[in-house]
Image (cartoon, rainbow, N blue to C red):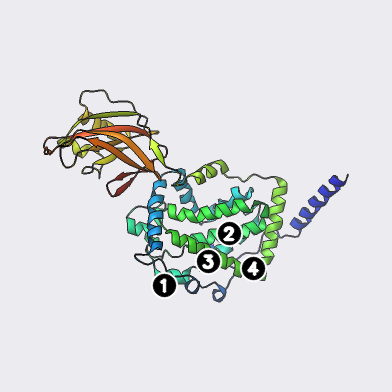
């Protein structure tokens, strides 16, 4: 009887809380197409230029770390983590509202949680604007401008070139949202914080921000939330969002998001993609110099390369082993790696493919000679599984592997 009374009391409390809410929060002015005004006035925003240290200097250990994290994160290109990072780059609503749905375990929509939905839209402006004094002052170049690799949002690259990299505005937004949502749903705080951290790291995966940009972006997100708690309107909306969360949880609504796919994508990390790839098939022989242009574009002069589709493999195979049946290879699951002479003619064979941080390094054994390359080079090809390999090391160059 006592348990039933407590259950009824909790239901009445949630219902009363929801009844006290307006169905829709009042409209808010846009400060930019699709971007609503925040809670904070310009003079009350945290000052990133005054709060943050300067970006890492040339020759510093901090810059070396930035470069190393960026280089290794390129190994996640074209993995599920890359796809998730591309989704995290979208700050347009209603799409952006779903970012934390799985972490919270509820749908976040204008219909089911209108006050929470509005809070996310408004605090986006507060968080990102808190980064702008430093961004404008330092105008730090972004990783894709340094390494020449594309980003997960190529349509935004022209705008990103004009917008300083330090600190990361996206990260400030994601961390501000995480702090606010953890207060709304303390029972889901660990899930929310993990998702907020990953949201910032997506900017590194996307090749648009450095590690230090993301670290200081989190700092500015936290500074913005601290300042928001002094705003009475924000505190009022925070209480309304808490009541919405409790009501939706009581209804048992699903997150309306593919949470399993998100969890699998978040499990990808360059530190995990390490080991030795099994060589499933291999061939050795001579390859005509006249047919080197059949190798994948941009790899004609390199000693190491990859063949990632059936048409390219057939074209190379017909020159490598003329008259022999082409082996059947499932390029959805496998890759062909080749090693060939570039300086002198030496018999060669691929003996091992080591994978570190998703980058494959080919170990090939060669005979020693000083025979000049004239009509032929020696070449070896090996089939390995795609899983865990996102790029290949070719000298000083890392070649991403496209899907």
Q: CA distance from mark 1 to mark 3?
A: 16 Å
Q: Residue 33 or 374: which is nearer the viewer? A: 374
Residue bearing the label numbered 1: 137
Q: CA distance from mark 3 to mark 2?
A: 12 Å
- Left or right, 347 with reference to 335: left
Q: Which secondary structure, mark 4?
A: loop
Q: CA distance from mark 2 to mark 4?
A: 13 Å
Marks 1 and 3, the one that precedes in the sequence:
1
Residue bearing the label numbered 3: 220
| Mark 4 surroundings: few (<14), some (14-19) or many (≥20) residues within 10 A | few
Residue bearing the label numbered 4: 229
Asked whether disc 4 touches disc 3, contact meaning CB atoms under 8 Å apart, the reply is no
Q: Please give the name of the residue rendered at 23% of the width and 43% of the height, measured from the top-left corner.
A: 302
Quadrant of residue 319 in the image?
Answer: top left
Asked whether disc 1 touches disc 3, contact meaning CB atoms under 8 Å apart, the reply is no
Q: Position of residue 185 (x, y in %)?
A: 66, 55
Q: Position of residue 390 (x, y in %)?
A: 38, 43
Quarter of the figure with the N terminus: top right
Q: CA distance from mark 2 to mark 1?
A: 26 Å
């Amino acid at each position: 009887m006592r348990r039933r009374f407590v259950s009824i009391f909790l239901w009445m409390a949630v219902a009363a809380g929801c009844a006290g809410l307006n169905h829709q929060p009042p409209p808010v002015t846009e400060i930019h197409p699709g971007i609503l005004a925040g809670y904070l006035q310009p003079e009350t925003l945290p000052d990133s230029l005054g709060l943050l240290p300067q970006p890492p200097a040339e020759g510093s250990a901090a810059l070396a770390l930035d470069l190393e994290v960026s280089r290794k994160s390129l190994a996640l290109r074209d993995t599920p983590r890359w796809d998730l990072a591309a989704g995290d780059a979208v700050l347009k609503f209603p799409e952006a509202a779903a970012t934390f749905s799985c972490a919270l375990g509820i749908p976040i929509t204008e219909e089911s949680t209108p006050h929470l939905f509005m809070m996310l839209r408004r605090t986006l402006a507060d968080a990102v604007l808190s980064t702008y004094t430093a961004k404008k002052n330092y105008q730090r170049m972004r990783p894709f401008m340094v390494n020449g690799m594309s980003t997960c949002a190529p349509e935004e690259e022209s705008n990103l070139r004009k917008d300083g990299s330090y600190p990361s505005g996206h990260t400030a937004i994601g961390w501000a949202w995480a702090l606010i949502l953890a207060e709304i749903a303390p029972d889901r705080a660990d899930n929310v914080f993990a998702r907020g951290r990953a949201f910032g790291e997506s900017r590194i995966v996307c090749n648009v921000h450095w590690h230090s940009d993301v670290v200081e972006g989190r700092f500015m997100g936290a500074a913005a939330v601290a300042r928001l708690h002094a705003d009475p309107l924000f505190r009022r909306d925070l209480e309304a969002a808490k009541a919405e969360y409790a009501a939706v949880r009581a209804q048992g609504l699903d997150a309306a998001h593919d949470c399993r796919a998100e969890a699998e994508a978040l499990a990808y990390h360059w530190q995990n993609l390490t080991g030795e790839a099994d060589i499933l098939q291999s061939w050795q022989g001579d390859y005509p110099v006249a047919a080197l242009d059949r190798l994948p574009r941009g790899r004609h002069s390199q000693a190491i390369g990859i063949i990632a589709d059936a048409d390219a493999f057939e074209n190379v195979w017909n020159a490598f082993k003329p008259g022999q049946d082409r082996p059947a290879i499932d390029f959805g699951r496998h890759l062909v790696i080749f090693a060939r002479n570039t300086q002198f003619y030496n018999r060669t064979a691929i003996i091992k493919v080591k994978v570190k941080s998703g980058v494959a390094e080919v170990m090939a054994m060669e005979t020693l000679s000083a025979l000049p390359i004239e009509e032929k080079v020696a070449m070896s090809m090996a089939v390995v599984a795609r899983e865990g390999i996102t790029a290949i090391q070719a000298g000083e160059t890392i070649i991403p592997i496209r899907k």
